[in-house]
Image (tube, rainbow, N blue to C red):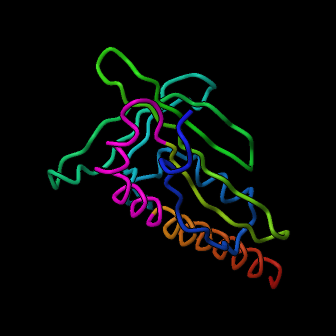
Amino acid sequence: MSDSKYLVTSIKVQINAPASLVWDVLVDLDKYPQWNPYTVRVESTLKMGEPVNLFLPNPGQPGELVHVIEHLATFDRPRQLSWEMSPSEHSADAARRDQYIEATGAATCTYFTTDLFLGPTAPVVMEQHGEWVRQGFDAVARSLKMRAESLYQNVALREQYLAQR
């Protein structure tokens, strides 16, 4: 396993919404284009070991997407969602992406994500793409916070309205 110098970590955001709602946002893959600026499309059954098709903006060719195929590695509702890429005949690249949600109260939680570059290409991948990945992960964390809080606020307002009727 590569050491932590090949680990990219996002900012940790405090989210004013329940961990279960944040989880629901993370696993609602069809809605990623509505809120996720870094992984703009995801296709998967979210079954362990099955493919996770990720589509990211190509930093070298604006307007183009990079298609990355990883496999679901952890599905621990509502705490951790992970996928990983193993070396193949087409690429020696390997990595593991972990997304963590930690409940800090009944209606609050934190979120952060990591990517650990693995294998012989880890030093080059980190050097060439580490900062781009970190910036993308920070944008995901901020956008997930905004999305979850907006959804939670809408639910709370609707419940408040119904209670007054």
Locate residue 12 relative to residue 88 in the image: left or right.
right
Q: Main secondary structure of the magenta part?
A: helix
Locate residue 140 relative to residue 159 in the image: left or right.
left
Residue at x 47%, y 66% (from the top left corner): 138
Q: Is residue 163 above or below residue 135?
A: below
Residue at x 63%, y 25% (from the top left corner): 48
On whether residue 133 falls in the magenta region, the answer is yes
Residue at x 46%, y 24% (from the top left corner): 86
Image quadrant in which you'd find residue 73: top right
> Could you tell me which quadrant the N terminus lies in?
top right
Q: Position of residue 6 (x, y in %)?
A: 47, 47
Q: Position of residue 9 (x, y in %)?
A: 53, 58
Residues 164 and 123: in front is 123
Residues 7 and 157: in front is 7
| Residue at the outermost top position | 89
Q: Is residue 105 above or below residue 73?
A: below
Residues 138 and 106: in front is 138
All told, the count of numbered labels is: 0
Q: Position of residue 119 (x, y in %)?
A: 45, 30
Q: Is residue 14 above or below residue 48?
A: below
Locate residue 92 relative to residue 77 in the image: left or right.
left
Boundaries of the magenta span: 117-139
Image quadrant in which you'd find residue 55: top left
Q: Position of residue 93 (x, y in %)?
A: 37, 30
| Residue at the outermost bottom position | 164
Residue at x 46%, y 40% (from the top left corner): 117
On whether residue 5 falls in the magenta region, the answer is no
